[in-house]
Image: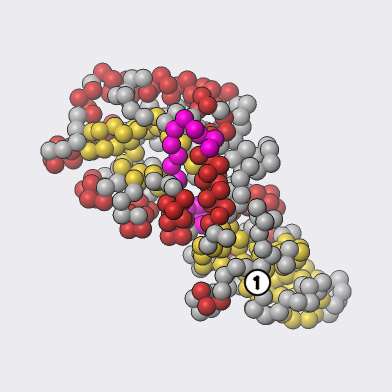
């Protein structure tokens, strides 16, 4: 899927003073949605839009996913779900982090599905159902080895022994979460699959969900009734040991604020960590670690201009980065350089910065303008 070398947005689409833009490609997002759904033919596919849609912008991503056909969404926090509810008034929304104490009425009024992962949460939701005199829908989360959230095997056994604990609760889904899905040969995957089947068999009959984006690629045994696609939707590689079968959906642009000429031997930035080996042109761009651009990319990162690599020189500072544009005479104040995109995906930046591509993407800050590029 070809992409243009320059930004597609118009300057008048930006707020005054914008110096960093994350441009979302709706066609690539739709293609990822369709590819993941095609690999999960047995059941449905939900979109995970937690953490501001993995840093890509919930208010941009959710309507685009809905237009692509997504009708079930997961968030992590209640606050995210309430924002999503305002964007999509009628859609199915579940909250992975469970039922906060005292939030039962908020869930009911906003028509949100709590993902119940403890007997206390089940009791609180059941009590809310009793107060209202109606059955309330919920998802049950069972822990198959992650040891984070979810009902332990002993708690599932107690539910099986006393099914009245679920009185008033309509179980619409039973789910768990894979811990090693990115490693297809890891025996933990099969162990969790066996545990999931065993635990689900003790609970009321309901649709089942185990696979995340990487789990979709583990094969039909992991498919069940619903998969929860998160990272893969945005183009993070769900099978890191192989070429990425999906498209990275974003292009992060940084605006050139100034260009100056310096002589050979002159330093740039904090600590004079880089010195010019020749007379050079240095562009200063409005992007820094306060925007989530990794500090560790100083003197080792690259950006792109018109499809060509531009070295990042000097430290990454809070609000600015500097690039050597000596070999790019077209770069002027107001030019846009690409700091992340299909040719500079989060995986590449993560390798250079010594971190996870998930962290690279979800760390993108609030000063970055998110724009949804229309499909071609």
Q: Quadrant of residue 20 in the image?
A: bottom right
Tell me where residue 361 appears, x and y as whole percent. Answer: 56, 54
User: Which residue is at the front of the view, 367 or 9?
Assistant: 9
Q: Is residue 272 above or below residue 29?
A: below
Q: Is residue 17 above or below residue 353?
A: below
User: Which residue is at the front of the view, 130 or 247?
Assistant: 247
Tell me where residue 209 appears, x and y as whole percent. Answer: 42, 32
Residue at 69%, 41% (x, y): give it: 243
Q: Is residue 359 left or right of residue 142?
A: right
Which residue carries the number 1 mark?
336
Q: Which quadrant holds the C terminus?
A: bottom right
Tell me where residue 78 appears, x and y as whole percent. Answer: 34, 50
Q: Is residue 57 above or below residue 228?
A: below
Q: Is residue 142 left or right of residue 316?
A: left
Q: Is residue 108 left or right of residue 184?
A: left
Number of dots carrying numbers: 1
Q: Quadrant of residue 43 in the image?
A: top left
Q: Is residue 307 left or right of residue 168?
A: right
Q: Is residue 294 above or below residue 188?
A: below
Residue at 74%, 59% (x, y): give it: 300
Taking the magenta stretch, the answer to whether it contains residue 44 is yes
Taking the magenta stretch, the answer to whether it contains residue 46 is yes
Residue at 36%, 58% (x, y): give it: 87
The residue range painted magenta reads 38-56
Tell me where residue 309 appears, x and y as whole percent. Answer: 76, 63
Q: Quadrant of residue 313 in the image?
A: bottom right
Scheme of colours in the image: secondary structure
Residue at 30%, 51% (x, y): give it: 90
Is residue 363 visible in the rendered image? The answer is: no
Give the SS element for disc 1: strand
Quick one: which residue is furthest to the front in this view? 376
């Amino acid at each position: 899927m070809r992409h243009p070398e320059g930004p597609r947005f118009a300057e008048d689409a930006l707020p005054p003073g914008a110096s960093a833009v994350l441009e979302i490609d709706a066609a690539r997002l739709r293609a990822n949605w369709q590819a993941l759904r095609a690999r999960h033919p047995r059941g449905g596919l939900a979109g995970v839009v937690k953490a501001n849609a993995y840093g890509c912008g919930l208010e941009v991503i959710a309507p685009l996913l809905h237009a692509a056909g997504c009708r079930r969404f997961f968030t992590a926090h209640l606050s995210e779900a309430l924002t999503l509810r305002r964007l999509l008034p009628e859609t199915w929304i579940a909250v992975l982090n469970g039922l906060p104490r005292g939030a039962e009425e908020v869930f009911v009024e906003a028509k949100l599905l709590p993902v119940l992962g403890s007997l206390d949460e089940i009791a609180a939701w059941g009590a809310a159902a009793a107060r209202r005199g109606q059955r309330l829908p919920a998802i049950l989360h069972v822990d198959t080895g992650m040891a984070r959230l979810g009902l332990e095997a002993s708690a599932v056994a107690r539910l099986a022994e006393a099914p009245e604990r679920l009185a008033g609760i309509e179980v619409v889904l039973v789910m768990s979460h894979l811990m090693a899905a990115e490693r297809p040969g890891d025996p933990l995957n099969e162990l969790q699959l066996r545990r999931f089947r065993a635990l689900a068999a003790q609970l009321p009959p309901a649709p089942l969900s185990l696979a995340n984006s990487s789990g979709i690629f583990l094969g039909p045994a992991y498919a069940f009734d619903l998969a929860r696609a998160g990272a893969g939707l945005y183009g993070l590689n769900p099978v890191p040991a192989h070429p990425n079968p999906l498209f990275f959906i974003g292009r992060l642009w940084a605006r050139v604020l100034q260009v100056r000429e310096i002589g050979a031997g002159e330093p740039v930035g904090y600590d004079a960590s880089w010195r010019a080996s020749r007379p050079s042109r240095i562009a200063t761009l409005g992007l820094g670690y306060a925007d989530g651009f990794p500090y560790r990319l100083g003197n080792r990162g690259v950006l792109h201009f018109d499809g060509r690599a531009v070295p990042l020189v000097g430290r990454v500072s809070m609000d600015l980065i500097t690039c050597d544009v000596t070999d790019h005479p077209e770069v002027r104040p107001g030019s846009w350089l690409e700091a992340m995109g299909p040719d500079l995906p989060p995986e590449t930046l993560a390798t250079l910065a010594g971190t996870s591509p998930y962290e690279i993407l979800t760390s993108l800050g609030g000063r970055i303008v998110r724009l949804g590029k229309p499909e071609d």
